[in-house]
């Protein structure tokens, strides 16, 4: 992974090449500028902490996309300039700096895709919802910088036939820099690959299978590998889809696991849908863990919508621990007038280590935002938020925030 950055840069350049001869009218560009002022009490969620931080944050985002009948290319750039305004804070720095590229090619019966991304974050401003199931919660208490790069390739063949197959490969790397003395964070490399197949029993019933492996390696530690296999069936109906899946995982550092889920996608009408998969994961030691996924969206009225998501799964962390991670959200948007809207968002995060060391915590968050359209191109946002974290072995910690921002977007066809 030493030359990962060079590989990603080369991939971005190579993928950009097909876009140079695109058809007129198929290219668009968009630039967004968002200037905000944020006041946060106890931003690091320290038990008993009561310090207040005031930040000026200037966010920039740029996107270029090009689309033809067969090819689609997208390139994104983003960054945020953080300027501390609190007394005693003078570290001005860029954060949330990212670049990503995506290319998809479609031909009769074939789909090829490639995506790559790189993201730079200051650990001081990293939050729980920025982590994935493999990360260690202790990273939120550190100082320094984290760079994450990823590359994924995927190919599907014979999509227009009764039998089809495909392959995919992914790799990622996490690199730390400027860490405080005594920090225990280490670089991590991850990779995964899989072969997959599809067979149409009928025009509405499909069988699928996937065989793969994933591995991760922390600097100075041995490599950890998980082999997996999954089988699924889906049945299309006029209102949605019924499906079921059976999967097996065999980690080389923990017990084997079997998961069974049943799910459905149901379209109420043009205003809403619900999609869910519910089931359980069974371990070799006769343990059973409920797992599932939910996505619900419904438009109550024009400019008024309710949405809910939930994802609970068992996975292996980079340090060898087996964890159950539950992430949920509930949101509601409503119109307060022709130019004003109100948004309410609730968040929930739970991480439970069922083997290995510690890292158990729960986090709850709520935010209320008012969005007002000042002009055709300018938006004003004002909001408040509250977050509470309960971590095993520590007292509960909470944080409050107030912010307002001015946002403008430019864009159009080239």
Image (spheres, rainbow, N blue to C red):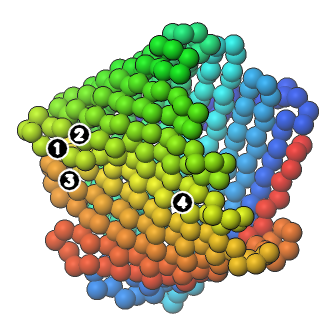
Residue at 46% across / 55% down in the picture? 309
Comparing 184 with 62, the one in front is 62
Mark yes or no: residue 93 visible. no
For residue 141, which quarter of the picture?
bottom left
For discs 2 and 4, the disc positioned in front in the rendered view: 4
Q: Are marks 3 and 1 in contact (CB under 8 Å)?
A: no
Quick one: label 3, few (<14), some, or many (20+) residues within 10 Å? some
* Residue located 43% across and 45% down the image: 276
User: Looking at the image, which residue is at 80% across and 75% down?
Assistant: 338
The residue where tag 1 is placed is 288
Q: Which residue is mark 2?
A: 281
Label 2 with label 4: CB-CB less than 8 Å:
no
Find disc 4 in the rendering and name its residue: 307
Choose the circle earlier in sequence order: 3 or 1. Answer: 1
> Which mark sits nearer the N-terminus, 3 or 2?
2
3 vs 1, front mark: 1
Query: In this view of the protein, can residue 353 be seen by the observer?
Result: yes
- Give how far apart the Cα atoms at labels 3 and 2 are: 15 Å
Q: Position of residue 209 (x, y in %)?
A: 39, 20
Mark with earlier residue (4, 3): 4
Q: Secondary structure at mark 3?
A: strand
Decide: is 57 above or below 322.
Answer: below
Q: Quadrant of residue 97?
A: bottom right
Callout 2: few (<14), some (14-19), or many (20+) C-alpha neighbours within 10 Å? Answer: many
Which disc, if any, is residue 353?
3
């Amino acid at each position: 992974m030493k030359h990962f950055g060079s590989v990603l840069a080369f991939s971005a350049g190579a993928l950009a090449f097909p876009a140079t001869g695109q058809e007129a009218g198929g290219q668009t560009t968009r630039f967004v500028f968002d200037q905000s002022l944020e006041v946060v009490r106890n931003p690091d969620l320290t038990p008993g902490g009561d310090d207040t931080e005031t930040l000026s944050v200037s966010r920039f985002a740029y996107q270029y996309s090009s689309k033809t009948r067969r090819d689609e290319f997208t390139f994104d750039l983003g960054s945020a300039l953080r300027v501390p305004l609190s007394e005693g804070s003078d570290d001005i720095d860029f954060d949330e700096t990212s670049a990503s590229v995506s290319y998809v090619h479609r031909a009769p019966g074939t789909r090829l895709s490639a995506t790559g991304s790189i993201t730079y974050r200051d650990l001081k401003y990293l939050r729980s919802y920025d982590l994935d199931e493999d990360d260690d919660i202790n990273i939120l208490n550190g100082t320094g910088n984290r760079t994450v790069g990823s590359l994924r390739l995927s190919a599907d063949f014979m999509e227009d036939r009764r039998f089809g197959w495909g392959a995919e490969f992914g790799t990622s790397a996490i690199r730390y820099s400027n860490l405080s003395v005594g920090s225990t964070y280490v670089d991590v490399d991850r990779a995964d690959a899989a072969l997959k197949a599809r067979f149409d029993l009928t025009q509405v019933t499909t069988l699928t299978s996937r065989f793969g492996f994933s591995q991760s390696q922390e600097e100075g530690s041995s490599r950890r590998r998980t082999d997996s296999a999954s089988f699924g069936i889906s049945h299309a109906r006029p209102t949605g889809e019924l499906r079921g899946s059976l999967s097996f995982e065999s980690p080389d550092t923990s017990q084997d696991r079997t998961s069974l889920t049943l799910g459905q996608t149901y379209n109420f009408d043009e205003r809403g849908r619900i999609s869910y998969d519910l089931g359980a994961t069974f371990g070799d030691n006769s343990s059973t863990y409920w797992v599932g996924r939910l996505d619900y969206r419904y438009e109550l009225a024009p400019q008024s919508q309710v949405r809910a998501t939930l994802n609970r799964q068992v996975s292996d962390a980079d340090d060898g621990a087996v964890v159950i991670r539950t992430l949920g959200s509930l949101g509601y948007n409503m119109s307060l007038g022709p130019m004003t809207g109100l948004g309410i968002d609730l968040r929930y995060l739970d991480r439970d280590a069922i083997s290995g060391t510690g890292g158990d915590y729960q986090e709850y968050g709520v935010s209320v935002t008012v969005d007002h359209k000042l002009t055709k191109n300018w938006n004003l946002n004002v909001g408040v938020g509250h977050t509470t974290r309960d971590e095993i072995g520590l007292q509960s910690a909470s944080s409050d925030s107030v912010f307002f921002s001015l946002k403008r977007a430019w864009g159009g066809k080239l």
